[in-house]
Amino acid sequence: MPLLKPAIESLLDDAKTSIDDRLRSLKRVPFRLRLKRLERAPRTPWRPRQIPTRILPIALVLIAVAAWIYYRVQAGQIEAARIPGDAQAELEVTKMRLDAIRSTLTVAAGLGGAAALVLGFRKQQHEEFHTTQQRIMDLRVHAVEQLTSENATVRKNGLLTLERLGEQHEELRSSVLDEICTYLRQPFDPDDHPGSTDPEREVRRKAQEILQRKLKRTLGPREYWSHDRLDLSGAHLERVDFGDCHLVAANFFSAVFAGDASFIESSFNGYTTFLATKFEGSAEFNHSTFLSGADFKFAEFGDIAFFSRAGFGSAAEFQHAIFRSPVDFEQTSFLSEFNAHGTRFNADTGFEHALFRERAAFHEVVFSGTAAFEFTKFRGDARFDATVFERRATILSSTFEKDAHFQGTDFRGPTTFWGSTFNGDANFEGTALHEPDIFDLVSFWRPLNPSQLPTGWNLEKLPSPSRYRYLVREPEPAAGPVPAADQPEPVATRERG
């Protein structure tokens, strides 16, 4: 019994840790809240139906049948009141028959008049509908023509006209958004429009302001502008605030964000692309949710970038992106594959408490600043092949549940894996380490082969009742200088032009 107690306590601790991690991951992934009621198709506008041609003869036949039935009922009543042999009674019967005929004709005329009234009313509805549609079309064409005017005031009035059309006609909202995005995609050179009070800058700010107001999730299903795409590829945007917005199939390919860009607590549905996008100011994606794929390949972040507590429901692609300032991925959840192949982090980078549910690819990445992977969870394979850590790397108390690849990784600054756990295979073949004691209290569930260890490092088993624990210690220094031929070659890095 005394021997079983440490093992039972260790299993209970592991179970508690797993439950806490599960609860924490559920709390930080606010997926699909209030989105189904926003993603509804716009109401189909009422329009009068066409009356089939066959309705007219059918109506005439029905009127004739109704008149005949009415007359037959009256004639039956008259015959029942007839007295045979009475001349005076015969005269009254004849008068009653004439009255029945007149009343029958009156009823038939009344039915025909009612039918004509219905037809006239439907004709008026058709005329009013087509008049309204023609007026809407004229207003839309006029607003689009205003957007091409050389006068900035006229262009702004065109935007206001489009906004009114979208507010009054729900079915036109997606088209109005397309027109506004088309205007923002027009070529714009900031050097040709200096100063914040430049007329063209004011018009473009108005267009951005309409988008930002009409795409808020807090508006509700009636006020929120439903759409199936938002194409701002190549657009020049200044001080954008899409915070708390819901964007569908957003396309920011090659767009330029001059000034700060805020997407705090925004949700993206459909494939979202920031391919080759340039963020000249800060980029804030805190608490944002990407329900489908997110493409940040070749994106350039000039100022600080925030992705803390964001959620990626599908593939997150950051290949060859450049982060020139600090970037924060704290408590970010990647529920599908994460790919940062060839990315450059030129300043401090933080992935503290991040969750990678599937494959995480950091191969051939350059971390020029401090790289923090503290309490990070790698549920799938983690690849750091040929990655360069030029300064401090803290992989502290992180968990690698599957294979971890560090072949050819170059740790040039202080490094620590203190308290981390490797549940799958770990491969450090060809890894360059320059600081001692970086593997203190690291847990390996699978023993490492000598070929998987960094050159010159050994393993030493520590006693434990429930798992393999190894302490990697630095070998004794060599007696003489190390020949140049035996020194590890530095990993070649190249910055994308």
Image (cartoon, rainbow, N blue to C red):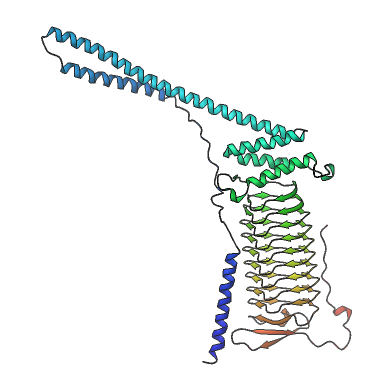
Judging depth in this view, the residue of 86 and 367 nearest the camera is 86
367 vs 75, left or right, is: right
Q: Is residue 385 something one can see in this rendering?
A: no
Taking 433 as reference, is 30 above or below it? above
91 vs 296, left or right, is: left
Residue drawn at x 73%, y 56% as measured from the top left: 283
Q: Quadrant of the C terminus?
A: bottom right
Taking 258 as reference, is 347 above or below it? below
Taking 3 as reference, is 194 above or below it? above
Measured as percent of width and height from the top left, residue 36 is found at 54, 52
Occupied quadrant, residue 178 = top right
Q: What residue occupies the far bottom of the structure in this picture?
A: 2
Residue drawn at x 18%, y 10% as measured from the top left: 92
Measured as percent of width and height from the top left, residue 309 is found at 65, 63
Residue drawn at x 73%, y 80% as measured from the top left: 453
Taking 105 as reference, is 331 above or below it? below
Q: Is residue 273 something one can see in this rendering?
A: yes
Judging depth in this view, the residue of 337 and 119 nearest the camera is 119
